[in-house]
Amino acid sequence: MHYPASDLVIDPVLIRKYDVSGPRYTSYPTADRFVEAFGEAELRQWHAKRNIGGFSQPLSVYVHLPFCDTVCYYCACNKVATRDKSQSAQYIKYLEKELALLEPSLDGVQPIGQMHWGGGTPTFLARDEIQALMVSIERRFRRQPDCECAIEIDPRTSPPGTMAFLADLGFNRASLGVQDFDAQVQKAVHRIQSEEQTRRVAGEARAAGFRSLNVDLIYGLPKQTLNSFDRTLDQVIALDPDRVALYNYAHLPTIFKPQRRIVAADLPGAESKLQILSLAIGRLTRAGYLYIGMDHFARPDDELALAQSQGRLQRNFQGYSTRRGSDLIGLGVSAIGSIGPTYYQNEKRLEDYYGELDAGRLPVTRGLELTPDDLVRRAVIQGLACHFRLSIESVELSYLVDFKKYFAPEMDMLRRLEAEGLVELQDDWIVVTPKGRLLVRLVCAVFDRYLRERQARAEYSKVI
């Protein structure tokens, strides 16, 4: 049977049964599989191979800007909380060093179809720093006419005029951090942000011509209740964003130090979290949003929804993306990139990142060259995560495998999930049913060889 991509059924019994930890598959293999044997020399080799035969993948650029004025206690990002604005000026100089070291590998000014500035809080930077960084990037990369230029925005550090300034620089997509509007929840997570601040920034973004606006929410935060989140959803729907990201809060205080300030007793229980999630999905879909997958919703006319309907959707380190097949240049501390069949990550600590650049080296700390097995599994996981269906024949033709023999153990596991109603196995298709879509990470994990062999080194968030 063919189900529309946005169809979704919430089955509380199945969700309770399968609410296990698992990766979000922003890459496969996942980042915990990267090895230190992959460094600057290996990355430069793969850069050199990009233009062999005169054909190369389009490029995307990700810039990590780690600074924040204050720490949000739920945060699991690589960030530096400081009120010392001179730190960002120094950081911009080191980004310039990284770009200069990268330049010889680029073979001239490269066209890019996508750029994303994340953090931290990019709006921590002063306007002259933002402008200087954009000029530095544009000396090495030429934005294509339809380039998607996205930036993460903290409304608390975006005074009037910020969005018009960013639009003048070429940014056309913004993601606003909200998480929750309830005053008690905001106090518990140390992020006080008024609806008025957020509404002003959203209005300014639209007036400045931003073509897509995303709002980030988190469910499962301390002090959060069904009623309080219902009110937050009222306020978010009134903002009328093009996209909504609804993330599950993963409480991992042993890994993320700021989370130690959250009182565990204030967290909603598993049943309450499921009720909040069900409420949010119902409210958003009734308000006209389509369920894209995992934690994303979009208006039917948004590029994300259109990309899914046209088979162009993919996942990368920023989540769902509309640009297929792009090589990704990661700039800045802890940034992850992908060139050809490789992944790489920069040094995670500022002092190490600066030290490598001072020594005249690209600050790559680890990475991975994918094996043929990794590549075919990545294609399967991408197909399931992005489209909830997979053509067995297309995988066989692309990777020259006999799918059902190659994935015999996985097919056995899928048959068990089929008995639960999570998937349908057809002669040439694997289809995630509307009942299985909230658990698509679980379906993807069937094809994760590293996870199955219990070699994964990281702790993951719960599926729900």
Image (cartoon, rainbow, N blue to C red):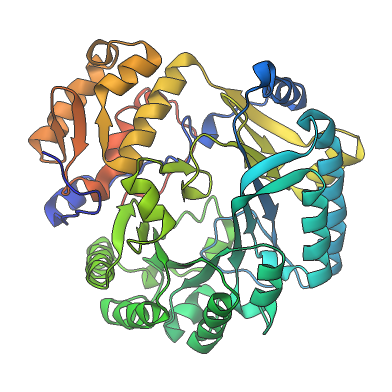
Can residue 451 be seen here? The reply is no
Q: Is residue 1 left or right of residue 149?
A: left
Judged from this view, the residue extending furthest toward the front is 145
Q: Nearer the viewer, residue 317 or 429?
A: 429
Image spot of residue 372 (x, y percent): 47, 15
Quarter-of-image position of residue 72: bottom right
Q: Name the residue rendered at 49%, 33% in the picture.
A: 457
Please tell me which residue is depicted at 61% across the width and 61% down the height of the picture.
151
Residue 323 seen anywhere in this rendered image of the structure: yes
Q: Nearer the viewer, residue 223 or 372?
A: 372
> Residue 11: x percent and y percent?
14, 54
Name the spot of residue 433 as percent of width and height, x first. Answer: 16, 43
Dividing the picture into quarters, in which one does residue 360 lie?
top right
- As drawn, the residue found furthest toward the right would be 359
Is 165 left, or right, of 185 in this rendering?
right
Q: How many marks?
A: 0
Q: Is residue 172 left or right of residue 243?
A: right
Question: Which image quadrant is residue 450 in?
Answer: top left
77 vs 421, nearest the viewer: 421
Residue 382, percent from left and from top: 38, 35
In the image, residue 44 sits, relative to residue 8, either above or below, namely: above
| Above or below 410: residue 138 | below
